[in-house]
Each structure stands twice: as C-alpha cells, then as structure tokens.
Amino acid sequence: MLLSGGLDSSTSLAVARDRGFEVHCLSVDYGQRHKGELARARQVARALGAASHRVVKVDLSAFGGSALTDRGIAVPKDRDERDMAGAIPATYVPARNTVMLSLALAWAEVLGARDVFIGVNAIDYSGYPDCRPEFLRAFERLAGLATKAGVEGARVRIHAPLLRLTKAGIVRLGTRLGVPYRITLSCYDPVAGRACGRCDACQLRRRGFEEAGVKDPTPYARPRARN
C-alpha cells in the first residue's frame, strides 16, 4: 500500500484492511517540501492496523520541475474549480506515481504479495496524468512483464479503490470505515504543521467534507479565501 498520510491513501488503506488484506505500507521521501506527511503516514499506519510500514528515500528534488520539490516554484493558491480543471498544475511531480508504483512493486515481490494499492482518484483530482485509469492498466501490464512473479504466471494486480469516487464519496467511505481524518495531511504547503487551507489539495479536501455532510476535522492555518 502506497501511503502518503493524506486523505485518499489513508482511505485506501482502510479499504484494503476492510477487504481482509494484511497490509504493508510504503511511504516515499521524495524530496517533497511537505515532509510532515511522512509522520502522518506513520500515525495512520498504526491507527489502521497495518502489518508494517517503511519509508524509502528517492530524491526527486534532484530534478525539480514541480512546486512540491522545488521551492523556487510557487504552490498555486486560491484557485477556482475551472482553473483546477485546466492545464496540468505546477504541483505535478514528473513521473512520481510511476516511480512510487515501481518501488511498491519491488517490495511486493520480496514480500510475495500480488496486490498493490494506490489512492489515486480520476474524478476529483487536479489533472495529474498518472492518476488516470489507462495509466494504471498500463502499469499492471508492465508488472506482468517486468517481474519474476509475472513471468512465472502470478498476476500482480494494481488496486485503486477510490478511482471513480468523488471527494465527497471518499470522505463518506472513509468515515464509515473509521479513518482518523484528523491525523491525515493533504496540504501541498503546510504552515507550521497545519494545512494552509488555500492550495488545490486543501480546497478539494474541504469541499469533499462539505459535500459529504461530514465535519472537517482539519486544522487550517487560514480560512478559505472569499471571492
């Protein structure tokens, strides 16, 4: 299970546990500016009964090219839904999900696991190309070709249980499964450990709670801007 410590991956962990899987969580220190998510991931893994959790370091900040790995690129703030649905945003990290799924696939082979979970979402998302169904299908085919397990006939399955849910649907599902959302962190640019309340991730998260009719337990550093 790829676990970032955010709303989506934490809900995916709860789904995997609800389906009866023994879950081994993998978080990646990829040079992101919001490293506080790694501490949240550890807390979530413990709270939801993961069998193990480890953090691996792959420094994508060596390449930059994203507001999440290069402090010279500003994190977009206070954008409306039309802007979010437009071009691929500056917070896209080149090849991030490809790299992370590859790491998860490697550990899965060592564990003898045949199921890899990822919390991507193709409906309420910010235009990331590596969150699309066709990307996941392609990676699953790759897993069958590029691994010892695949060559020997043991199919590796990529699970994205939130893929076709709205953010509100994710919140409702996670609430039913007991996800401790108060300890999760989705923000792209936290302020003193608190969610900024203004980046795309914060706005999508806040809207999800509002539309789900669930109280948002997130401590935001600043309220949503009013236009």
Image (spheres, rainbow, N blue to C red):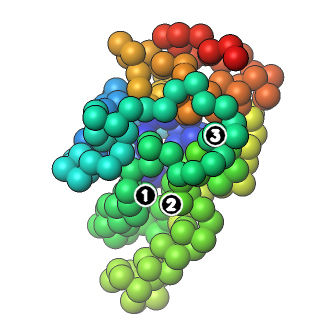
Give the position of the C terminus as an image quadrant: top right
Q: Quickly name the residue at label 3.
A: 83
Image quadrant where residue 171 sits: top right
Q: Earlier in the sequence, mark 2 or mark 3?
A: 3
User: Of the residues tagged 1 and 3, which is closer to the observer?
Assistant: 3
Q: Are marks 2 and 1 in contact (CB under 8 Å)?
A: yes
* In the rendered image, the vertical position of residue 108 relative to residue 92, given as above or below: below
Q: Label 1 amino acid?
A: Asn
Q: Residue at x 65, y 24 (%)?
A: 206
156 or 140, nearer to the observer: 140
2 or 3: mark nearer the eye = 3
Residue at the farthest left position: 62
Mark 2 vs mark 1, CA separation in Å: 6 Å
Question: Which is nearer the N-term, disc 2 or disc 1?
Answer: 1
The answer to whether mark 2 and mark 3 are in CB contact below 8 A is no
The amino acid marked with disc number 3 is Asp
The residue wearing badge 2 is 130
Query: Which disc, if any, is residue 43?
Result: none
